[in-house]
Image (tube, rainbow, N blue to C red):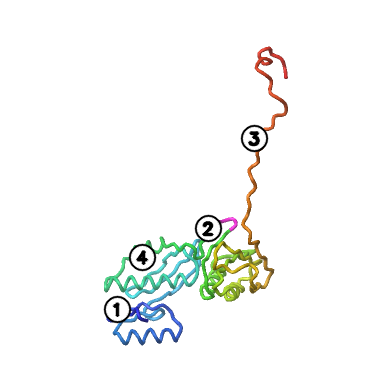
Amino acid sequence: SGIIKPGSIVVMAEQPADAAEVLLERAQEVGATVAREGLEYGVISRVAAVGGQVVSLQGLRARYDDVFLPVFGAHQAQNAAVALAAVEAFAGEAELDEDLVRAAFAEVSTPGRLEVIRRSPTIVLDAAHNPHGARASAAALEDSFQFDPLIGVIGVMGDKDHEGLLAAFEPTSPTSSARRTPRRARCRPLTSPSRPTRSSTRTASPSWPTWPRRSRRPRHWPRRARPSAARWARGRSW
């Protein structure tokens, strides 16, 4: 709450009741204007679409319908609403150009946040590192993808809540869950206990792959020796 300054505009995303109470008290104390998600602005509707989702957003100045977001999950739609309200607050009383808003959101990218890095098979990369983020990612997997089977691979730092992360992803019912330890001092070793998923759990080897050396054999294996130039000159068969 210390970042709330006198005379400022506070764009407040949805908060737990106790956190919202602290923020509102601070805003009232310094005379700041508060814009709350779900009241002054927010997501009106959202529909999953190919490559993302289509949303309708209520801003502080106007409503914006049929906005395409090339990102996945309800939490990303909420992030878009917060960003829109923040820009409107910065712009003052002037309304934003609707086409410009659509074009800007169409260019949004969130590397490492439910990022599709491959198709056939589809591989989704997500950097959720706490239970709250993992729950949002798990909900987005069920909302925007139809994996059959779903295979989860997770790497966890030693100071993170790996039990909470696995519990958050458990409702997605992955076929297997593998945990690979990168070469970092903070990484949790593979021998540490972990929460199994409802299905089988596979643990990856901690050793890094050793690639075989390239074969030294010739590219082509002749069936028989080539004839000498002299034999060709004499016209003899070989």
Mark found first going from the N terminus, 3 or 4: 4
Query: Crowding at label 2, few (<14), some or many (≥20) Cα neighbours within 10 Å?
Result: few
Q: Position of residue 56 (x, y in %)?
A: 42, 71
Q: Which mark is residue 154?
A: none
**Residue 108 in the figure: left or right of residue 172:** left
Whichever of labels 4 and 2 marks the residue nearer the N terminus, that label is 4
Residue corresponding to mark 4: 101
Q: Residue at x 51, y 65 (%)?
A: 114
Q: Residue 95: name its quadrant.
A: bottom left
The residue where tag 2 is placed is 117
**Secondary structure under the numbered disc 4 in the rendered image:** helix
**From the viewer's perspective, is the residue at label 3 or at label 2 nearer?**
3
The residue at the point 59 percent across, 66 percent down is 154
Based on the picture, tell me whether residue 90 belongs to the magenta stretch.
Answer: no
> How many angstroms separate mark 3 from mark 4 (CA)?
58 Å
| Residue marked by disc 3 | 219
21 relative to 61 in the view: left or right: right
Residue at 57 percent across and 60 percent down: it is 123
- Element type where label 1 sits in the image: loop
**Distance from label 3 to label 1 (Cα)?**
72 Å
**Residue 150 picture location, percent across and down:** 62, 65
Per the image, the residue denoted by label 1 is 8
- Name the front one of labels 3 and 1: 3
Q: Residue furthest front?
A: 185
Name the secondary structure under disc 3. loop
- The amino acid on which the numbered mark 4 sits, given as a three-letter code, is Val
Q: Are marks 2 and 1 in contact (CB under 8 Å)?
A: no
Quadrant in the rendering for residue 1: bottom left
Q: Is residue 95 left or right of residue 132?
A: left
